[in-house]
Amino acid sequence: MQALRAVLFNAGMMLFAVVFALAGLLFTPFPFRVRYAFISQWARVTLWWLAITCNLRFEVEGRDNIPGSTAIIFCKHQSAWETLALQLIFPPQVWLMKRELLWIPFFGWGLALLEPIAINRAQGSKAIRQLVVQGTARLRAGRWVVIFPEGTRVAPGERGTYHKGGALLAEKSACSVVPVAHNAGEYWPRHGFMKKPGTIRVVIGPAIATTGRKAAEINALAEQWIEAQMQRIGSSQ
């Protein structure tokens, strides 16, 4: 039965992606806020479908820590789930991502409409400069920026290297960093097809002030908070 539920969910998710990507092209001439309002409904519908088919829901702790001003989100990356859920939890946002994601038919088209910061990881320092320049511009335009500081998905109980790019953006832009921990990987594995029923826990931490702080300190503070919360909420750890 669990396998059947996973099949139904994935079929629906792909169908929704095609529908929203094609319909979203009609919104190309409109401003970002209009395009975002439409395309982000794909995340809402997909998570609704996840709850219906796989009985997988989520709860959020620390919503009162979300600041009223534009900020940078540093989020633990364990699965595809958080890329959907962050859109429901936080204000309109753009993501730092590898440019290859924009090449995926339908899915990539929808992403492109949301003006992500799409980098070529192989370019090293050039990619970091792109993140700082484009990220600062997005923040000044009133859009939040989502960073997965480990750069790739990690399995529950594991910790990746927290890269400096997001922290450097925080230092240069002087925007606060909002750390986010969750245990989605225990229910929606990074390379797994099956989805386990249950309730994913998301914890939002107090915003980290960045004025007067260097990137290394910002990164260390975010990592310390996130990993401490992972120890608290991760049943596999």
Image: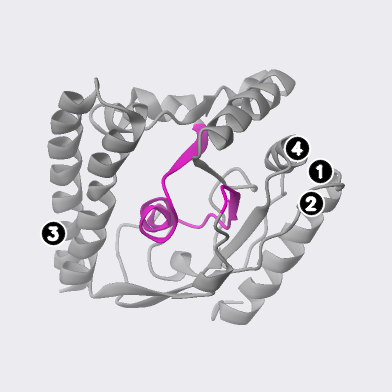
**Which label number is shown at residue 218?**
2
Image coordinates of residue 138 in percent, x first then y, are: 53, 32
Q: Which residue is mark 4?
A: 168
The amino acid pointed to by label 2 is Ile
**Which label number is shown at residue 8?**
3
Q: Which residues make up the magenta segment?
A: 69-97
What is the spatial separation of the Cα atoms under label 1 and label 4, in whole angstroms? 5 Å
What is the spatial separation of the Cα atoms under label 4 and label 2, in whole angstroms? 8 Å
The amino acid pointed to by label 4 is Leu
User: Which one is closest to the eye, mark 3 or mark 4?
Assistant: 4
Q: Which residue is mark 1?
A: 215
Examine the rendered structure and indicate whether residue 5 appears above or below residue 134.
below
Numbered disc 2: secondary structure: helix
Numbered disc 4: secondary structure: helix
* Sequence-first tag of 3 and 1: 3
* Sequence-first tag of 4 and 2: 4
Image coordinates of residue 228 in percent, x first then y, are: 70, 73
Image coordinates of residue 19 in percent, x first then y, are: 12, 38
What is the spatial separation of the Cα atoms under label 3 and label 1, in whole angstroms? 44 Å
Q: Is 126 a magenta residue?
A: no
* Sequence-first tag of 2 and 3: 3
CB under 8 Å between discs 2 and 1: yes
What sort of colour scheme is used for the picture?
A: one colour
* Sequence-first tag of 3 and 4: 3
Q: Is residue 76 left or right of residue 85?
A: right
Q: Residues within 10 Å of mark 1 (few under 14, many from 20)?
A: some
Q: Is 90 a magenta residue?
A: yes
